[in-house]
Image: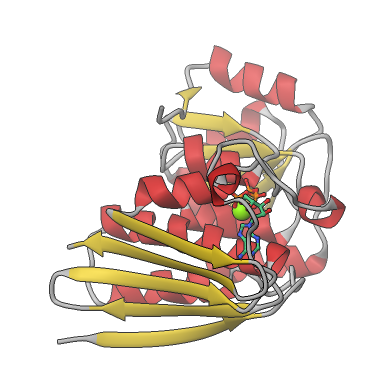
């Protein structure tokens, strides 16, 4: 059994951002996944979704639910992250005024995604964009 | 403590999710940084915050927290209240500042909802 769901996230759309994560949470609840795992996927997915809305030019979230794992792939086509080591450091942020006014820009998102996922991979290239792959073992 | 007691102590106005006033809450978290909430807060806690936008609702939903108290008399827009009603989430607003609201709940037995 395998289940797939894809979402688009628009740049700068702070009104509807979070909608994909809410749907992902509902879907996982309907599939009977344990609430402990749902919380991890929801938090990591939502941080990724907000990063797409705040920092990227827009991107996609793909949810895959397989027999033994849940996979979240979050990718965008720019602008990319110049220094991944810095970006993964707690407290480091380039978030602008608008994002900060919404309560974002603590520089905690990426490290928190890494902490919640059982497997976390990030690739980024300026000019190409960013791709994050997270696995959660069932 | 029951969430109805939280409402009473803070003299809060209930904006949505009234049916949850009978639910229990053991811990609280006071913060305006949503990623810090997602990082440090335990589930089933009440979030006290001065931010009143939709992302506060999403944050509480994703982190499985059970209710929100807006402090300093902040009133969210109709849109935000409608979204909270659709999510069936208990949301209240109090005249007290964050420090006072947290202090009153703590003095009455609520513990900090920290994970780390
Ligand atoms: N998809 C992305 N595209 C471009 N840059 C990104 C992307 N995601 C993250 N970044 C960069 O990495 C930094 C750190 O991201 P992280 O999510 O950890 O913190 P933040 O979004 O700034 O604040 P927080 O997540 O705490 O609200 C960002 O400030 C931004 O510079
Ligand atoms: Mg972020």
Among the 4 quarters of the image, the one containing residue A68? bottom left
Q: Position of residue A21 (x, y in %)?
A: 50, 69
Residue at the image position 77 percent from the left and 55 percent from the top: A99
Instruction: Give the answer, above or below, for where A69 lies relative to B59.
Output: below
Residue at the image position 42 percent from the left and 80 percent from the top: A62
Q: Position of residue B70 (x, y in %)?
A: 72, 42
**Relative to A116, A77 lies left or right:** right
Q: Position of residue B9 (x, y in %)?
A: 64, 26
Q: In which quadrant is the N terminus of chain A drawn?
A: bottom left
Q: Judge by depth and name the residue closer to the eye, B93 or B99.
A: B99
Residue A116 visible from this viewpoint: yes
Instruction: Give the answer, above or below, for where A44 lies relative to A10.
Output: above
Among the 4 quarters of the image, the one containing residue A26? bottom left
Residue at the image position 70 percent from the left and 63 percent from the top: A55
Residue at the image position 67 percent from the left and 74 percent from the top: A127
Q: Judge by depth and name the residue closer to the eye, B73 or B32.
A: B32
Q: In which quadrant is the C terminus of chain A drawn?
A: bottom left
Q: Quadrant of ligand 1?
A: bottom right
Among the 4 quarters of the image, the one containing residue A72? bottom left
**Relative to A14, A32 lies left or right:** left
Q: Position of residue B60 (x, y in %)?
A: 54, 51
Instruction: Give the answer, above or below, for where B71 lies relative to B92.
Output: above
Instruction: Give the answer, above or below, for where B99 lies relative to A82.
Output: above
Residue B16 visible from this viewpoint: no
Render colour scheme: secondary structure
Residue farthest top in this picture: B107
């Amino acid at each position: 059994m395998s289940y797939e769901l894809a979402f688009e996230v628009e740049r700068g759309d702070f009104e509807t951002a979070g909608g994909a994560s809410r749907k992902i949470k509902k879907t996982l609840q309907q599939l009977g996944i344990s609430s402990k795992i749902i919380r991890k996927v929801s938090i990591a997915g939502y941080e990724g979704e907000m990063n797409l809305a705040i920092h990227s030019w827009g991107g996609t979230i793909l949810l895959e639910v397989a027999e033994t794992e849940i996979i979240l792939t979050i990718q965008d086509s720019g602008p990319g992250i110049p220094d991944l080591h810095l970006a993964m450091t707690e407290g480091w942020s380039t978030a602008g005024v608008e994002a900060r006014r919404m309560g974002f820009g603590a520089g905690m998102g990426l490290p928190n995604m890494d902490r919640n996922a059982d497997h976390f991979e990030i690739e980024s290239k300026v000019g190409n964009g960013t791709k994050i792959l997270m696995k959660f073992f069932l | 403590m029951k969430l109805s007691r939280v409402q009473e102590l803070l003299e809060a106005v209930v904006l949505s999710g009234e049916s949850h006033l009978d639910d229990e809450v053991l811990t609280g978290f006071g913060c305006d940084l949503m990623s810090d909430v997602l990082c440090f807060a335990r589930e089933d806690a009440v979030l006290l915050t001065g931010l009143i936008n939709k992302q506060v609702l999403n944050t509480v939903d994703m982190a499985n927290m059970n209710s929100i108290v807006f402090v300093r008399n902040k009133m969210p827009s109709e849109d935000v209240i409608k979204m909270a009603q659709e999510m069936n989430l208990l949301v209240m607003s109090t005249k007290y500042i964050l420090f006072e609201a947290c202090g009153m709940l703590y003095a009455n037995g609520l513990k900090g909802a920290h994970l780390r």
